[in-house]
Image: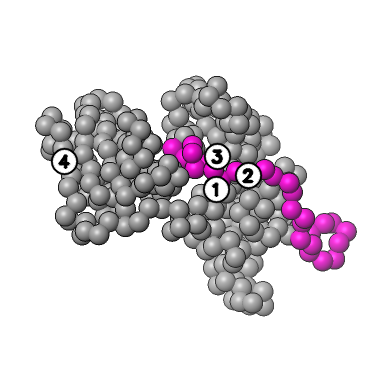
């Protein structure tokens, strides 16, 4: 098979950065019979033995994020993870990532002459749980959750952790939670066409966008954002219903508080103001509504 793309994910240390550049130079050199067309070396921020808390909260999460990003670019069928080298926790975690994202994981033991493929590790994954809570997972992944979901559902216990950033405590995903989230983002993308509701039979420019009186023209970037949202095939119409000039927060989507399965609540912020709006879709079941929330979160928030 053609050696197309090689990506080194290196530790957040001087040795890691140095070895990453050496390996990059070696595998992209024109005289190397094993050269690759494209070679990259990326430092995983926080993956360092100098700070065990950063290793867990940032380093392992970034390992999952980087691999998931490549999966989204290339597709899992074209990838192999080589877990040789690095910290022991990375090797174990690589096995979990491989199974969750459907990628073979290989390793070269010190006394072995050949690379072996690691056997899959048992991991319990539930797509329906992720879909029902997609909005929460996306907020946690962005470290923007307002409150912990653990008290509402104990299944979040191992997936959420409180981390400290610049003296401020925030809620985010644990490394296992990041893996759980990324694996189901991947699975959802594979199945999204059969899970989403049908397309609207009218052109995007015919779909109505209605602004509540105090909001029209006041929120920078809102009109452009909603215009992009109007292009989504299953969206029928959009109307805003709340505006606050000084309430910044991350963009979001979640099931409508009104209980209508055809509607999804959204929030848009430019970093200063916040507008809340309803997106009316072609969804007719709760499962389709959950799929819409997951799809819009992935596309827009």
Q: Secondary structure at mark 2?
A: loop
Sequence-wise, which precedes: disc 3 or disc 1?
A: 3
In the rendering, at what x and y percent does residue 182 appear?
A: 54, 47
Asked if the residue under mark 3 is in contact with the one under mark 4, i.e. CB atoms within 8 Å, the reply is no
Which residue position is annotated with label 1?
Answer: 184
Which residue position is annotated with label 4?
Answer: 210
- Left or right: 156 as drawn, with respect to 209: right
Q: Report the predominant secondary structure element of the magenta stretch.
A: loop
Q: Which mark is residue 133?
A: none
Residue closest to the far front:
284
Compared to 258, does 123 lie above or below? below
Asked if the residue under mark 2 is in contact with the one under mark 3, i.e. CB atoms within 8 Å, the reply is no
Magenta highlight range:
108-135
Sequence-wise, which precedes: disc 4 or disc 3?
A: 3
**Residue at point 63% right, 68% down?**
27
Which residue position is annotated with label 2?
Answer: 125
Sequence-wise, which precedes: disc 4 or disc 1?
A: 1
Q: CA distance from mark 2 to mark 1?
A: 8 Å
């Amino acid at each position: 098979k053609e050696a197309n793309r090689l990506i080194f994910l290196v530790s957040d240390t001087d040795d890691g950065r140095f070895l990453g550049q050496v390996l990059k130079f070696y595998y992209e050199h024109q005289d190397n019979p094993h050269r690759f067309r494209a070679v990259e070396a990326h430092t995983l921020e926080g993956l360092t033995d100098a700070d065990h808390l950063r290793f867990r909260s940032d380093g392992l999460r970034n390992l999952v994020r980087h691999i998931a990003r490549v999966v989204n670019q290339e597709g899992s069928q074209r990838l192999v993870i080589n877990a040789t080298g690095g910290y022991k926790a990375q090797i174990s975690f690589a096995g979990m990532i491989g199974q969750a994202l459907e990628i073979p994981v290989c390793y070269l033991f010190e006394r072995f002459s050949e690379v072996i493929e690691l056997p899959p590790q048992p991991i319990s994954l539930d797509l329906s749980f992720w879909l029902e809570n997609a909005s929460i997972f996306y907020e946690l992944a962005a470290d923007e959750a307002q409150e912990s979901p653990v008290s509402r559902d104990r299944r979040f216990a191992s997936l959420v952790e409180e981390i400290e950033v610049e003296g401020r405590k925030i809620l985010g995903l644990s490394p296992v939670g990041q893996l759980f989230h990324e694996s189901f983002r991947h699975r959802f993308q594979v199945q999204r066409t059969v899970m989403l509701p049908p397309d609207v039979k009218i052109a995007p420019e015919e779909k109505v966008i209605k602004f509540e009186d105090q909001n029209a023209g006041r929120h920078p970037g809102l009109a452009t954002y909603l215009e992009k949202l109007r292009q989504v095939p299953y969206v029928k119409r959009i109307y805003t219903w709340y505006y606050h000039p000084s309430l910044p927060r991350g963009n979001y989507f979640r099931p409508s508080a009104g209980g209508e399965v055809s509607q999804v609540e959204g929030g848009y912020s430019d970093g200063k103001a916040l507008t809340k709006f309803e997106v009316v879709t072609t969804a007719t079941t709760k499962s389709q509504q959950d799929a819409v929330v997951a799809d819009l979160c992935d596309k827009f928030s």
